[in-house]
């Protein structure tokens, strides 16, 4: 017989909108599994900028909050219980997945079997647990600008959680990628075939033109509206601009906003997992924190200087 299945588990909660100080860890009951659901013991769970906005109440119209609220989307772990009708997975199997219930920052998470793919042995728990949001967002953003072999594409915040995957997807397609990032990240960008450029706003367009005198064909923004302004200044057509951060500005100029919303499915997650597991792409882990240190993890993420991903280890 296997180990007894728990009926309670520790999980991150918040009871009101606010800064990191509203976060706490509590013992919460685990509901019975529904049809085609699995109970997964979480080994790692990524943290993402969108979770900061949800916690702060900044995007209530899109992501309303019911209190007490859980938190977290990304995770990787081991299946410890299978609901009736579950298909494709067995007990004890390592999986990568996502929760649409804001519940992955916890010791255990319950998800439908359609929200999971198998975790290859080549992936560490930390990398696997941070792949979903950043990976599918990057996949959709890179696809949106339709970069062709030999074209020049600029990527903002190119060493961040999403940007670091976008640049690798684009270079794999044969695009010439210019990555906007801070100086400490330039060596890593160069190592994956990206031409780095500093993010200081003064003279940025001129520095990019010096690197790409024939012009820029597309731009992927993972940071904010100022980079949509930069794209227009560089002469990039609006239909070749994609942002995952500046939706209002995108509406104003006719740019695209493809991200996780158009790519949240197991097929896309599987492609991202394969990309990283085979070594075609890589994910940088900036830091790991225990569940009890969730406030510190988000405080670090909010600085917006991380290379790659920050991960919770329950």
Image (cartoon, rainbow, N blue to C red):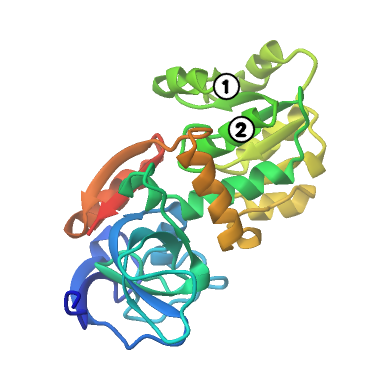
Q: Nearer the viewer, residue 113 or 72?
A: 113
Q: Quadrant of the C terminus?
A: bottom left
Q: Is residue 264 visible?
A: no
Q: Secondary structure at mark 1?
A: loop
Q: Nearer the viewer, residue 308 or 66?
A: 308
The answer to which of marks 2 and 1 sits earlier in the sequence is 2
The image quarter containing residue 103 is bottom left
Q: Secondary structure at mark 2?
A: strand
Real-space CA distance between mark 2 and mark 1, rounded to the nearest whole angstrom:
10 Å
Residue at 53% over, 71% down: 114
Q: Is residue 98 above or below residue 182?
A: below
Question: Looking at the picture, how far across and down is residue 143, in whole percent?
Answer: 70, 44
The extreme front residue here reads 1
Q: Is residue 184 visible?
A: yes
Q: Is residue 93 above or below residue 230?
A: below
Question: Looking at the picture, how far across and down is residue 58, in whole percent?
Answer: 48, 64
Determine contact: label 2, label 1, CB under 8 Å: yes
Q: Residues within 10 Å of mark 2 (few under 14, many from 20)?
A: many
Residue at 45% over, 50% down: 131
Residue at 43% over, 24% down: 185
Question: Looking at the picture, how far across and down is residue 225, in whole percent?
Answer: 62, 43
Question: Looking at the picture, how far across and down is residue 215, in whole percent?
Answer: 78, 20
Q: Quadrant of the N terminus?
A: bottom left
Q: Which residue is disc 1 drawn over? A: 194
Q: Nearer the viewer, residue 251 or 152?
A: 152
Q: Which residue is disc 2 drawn over? A: 155
């Amino acid at each position: 017989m296997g180990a007894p299945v728990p009926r309670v588990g520790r999980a991150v909660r918040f009871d009101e909108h606010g800064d990191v100080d509203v976060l706490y860890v509590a013992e919460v009951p685990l509901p019975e599994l529904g049809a085609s659901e699995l109970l997964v013991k979480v080994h790692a769970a990524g943290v993402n900028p969108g979770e900061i906005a949800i916690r702060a109440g900044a995007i209530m119209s899109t992501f309303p909050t019911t209190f007490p609220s859980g938190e977290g989307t990304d995770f990787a772990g081991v299946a410890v219980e299978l609901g009736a009708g579950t298909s494709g997975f067995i007990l004890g199997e390592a999986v990568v997945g996502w929760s649409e219930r804001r519940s992955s920052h916890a010791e255990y998470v319950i998800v439908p079997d359609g929200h999971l793919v198998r975790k290859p042995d080549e992936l560490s728990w930390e990398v696997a647990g941070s792949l979903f949001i950043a990976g599918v967002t990057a996949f959709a953003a890179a696809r949106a600008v339709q970069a062709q072999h030999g074209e020049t594409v600029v990527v903002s915040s190119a060493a961040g959680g999403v940007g670091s995957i976008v640049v690798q997807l684009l270079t794999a397609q044969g695009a010439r990628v210019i990555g906007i990032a801070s100086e400490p990240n330039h060596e890593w960008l160069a190592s994956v075939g990206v031409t780095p450029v500093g993010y200081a706003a003064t003279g940025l367009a001129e520095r990019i033109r010096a690197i790409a005198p024939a012009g820029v064909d597309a731009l992927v923004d993972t940071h904010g509206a100022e980079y949509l302004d930069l794209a227009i200044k560089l002469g990039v057509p609006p239909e070749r601009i994609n942002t995952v951060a500046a939706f209002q500005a995108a509406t104003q100029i006719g740019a695209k906003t493809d991200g996780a919303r158009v790519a949240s499915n197991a097929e896309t997650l599987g492609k991202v997992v394969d990309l990283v597991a085979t070594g075609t792409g890589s994910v940088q882990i900036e830091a790991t924190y225990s569940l009890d240190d969730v406030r510190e993890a988000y405080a670090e993420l909010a600085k917006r200087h991380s290379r790659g991903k920050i991960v919770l280890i329950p």
